[in-house]
Image (cartoon, rainbow, N blue to C red):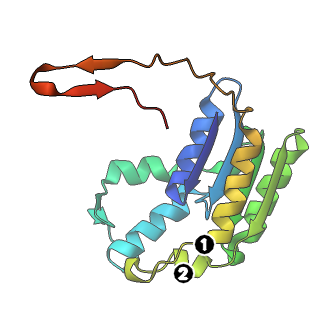
């Protein structure tokens, strides 16, 4: 099993991989929210732009005080063991230091973990009308996930008999293979 996510989805994907018995084969994170507390602060700023106010929604999603409290308690930097055999953390360039430290912690346990900044972060995290997909980052994530995928097994095709079904009014149905 492999997990991937962006921002809050990366936080959730990492926690899901960590909670899975035996961990995951791969984890690919894009601009991960490493700290729920800092992500909650971002939600507050997005919702109102005023520090210290409590939002009721952000980006169209309802935000409750209970959710913010639970979110604030989450911190991926507390995970001392890697939740996956192979982890890739692609992060915003000015947040590379904490991601690199986390990857080093996870690598110390023998798993492969790496962190790197990705080009186009500012265009991905822009207002919705200005978002641009970071294709190179998506390709890097695809490669990590593909590495972890088991080899594809081809299911042999069964011979389909050549048959014609004759229906009333001169209608016929015939098996066609292509």
Q: Is residue 128 left or right of residue 55?
A: right
Q: Which mark is residue 170?
A: none
Quarter containing the N terminus: top right
In terms of depth relative to the viewer, which is nearer, 136 or 101?
136
Q: Is residue 74 visible?
A: no
Residue sitting at 31 percent across and 57 percent down? 63
Q: Are marks 1 and 2 in contact (CB under 8 Å)?
A: yes
**Residue matched to label 1:** 134
Q: Is residue 39 left or right of residue 156?
A: left
User: How far across and down, in percent of the image, does residue 130 sit?
Assistant: 44, 83
CA–CA distance in space, label 1 to label 2: 8 Å
**Residue matched to label 2:** 123
Does 112 sit above or below residue 29? above
Residue sitting at 73 percent across and 32 percent down? 150
Residue sitting at 61 percent across and 31 percent down? 19
Quadrant housing residue 55: bottom left
Does 123 sit above or below residue 61? below
User: How far across and down, in percent of the image, does residue 83 sit?
Assistant: 71, 38
Q: Is residue 171 visible?
A: yes
Q: Is residue 146 left or right of residue 37?
A: right
């Amino acid at each position: 099993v492999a997990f991937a996510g962006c921002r809050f989805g990366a936080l959730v994907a990492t926690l899901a991989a960590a909670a899975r018995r035996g961990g995951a084969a791969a984890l690919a994170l894009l601009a991960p929210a490493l700290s729920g507390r800092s992500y909650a602060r971002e939600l507050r700023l997005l919702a109102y732009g005023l520090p210290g106010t409590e939002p009721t929604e952000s980006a169209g999603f309802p935000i409750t005080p209970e959710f913010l409290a639970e979110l604030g308690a989450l911190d991926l930097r507390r995970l001392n063991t890697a939740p996956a055999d192979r982890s890739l953390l692609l992060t915003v360039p000015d947040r590379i230091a904490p991601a690199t430290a986390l990857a080093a912690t996870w690598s110390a346990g023998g798993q492969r973990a790496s962190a790197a900044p990705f080009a186009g972060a500012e265009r991905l995290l822009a207002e919705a009308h200005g978002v641009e997909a970071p294709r190179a980052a998506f390709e890097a994530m695809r490669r990590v996930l593909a590495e972890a995928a088991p080899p594809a097994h081809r299911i042999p095709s069964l011979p389909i008999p050549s048959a014609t079904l004759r229906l009333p009014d001169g209608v016929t149905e015939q098996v066609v293979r292509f």
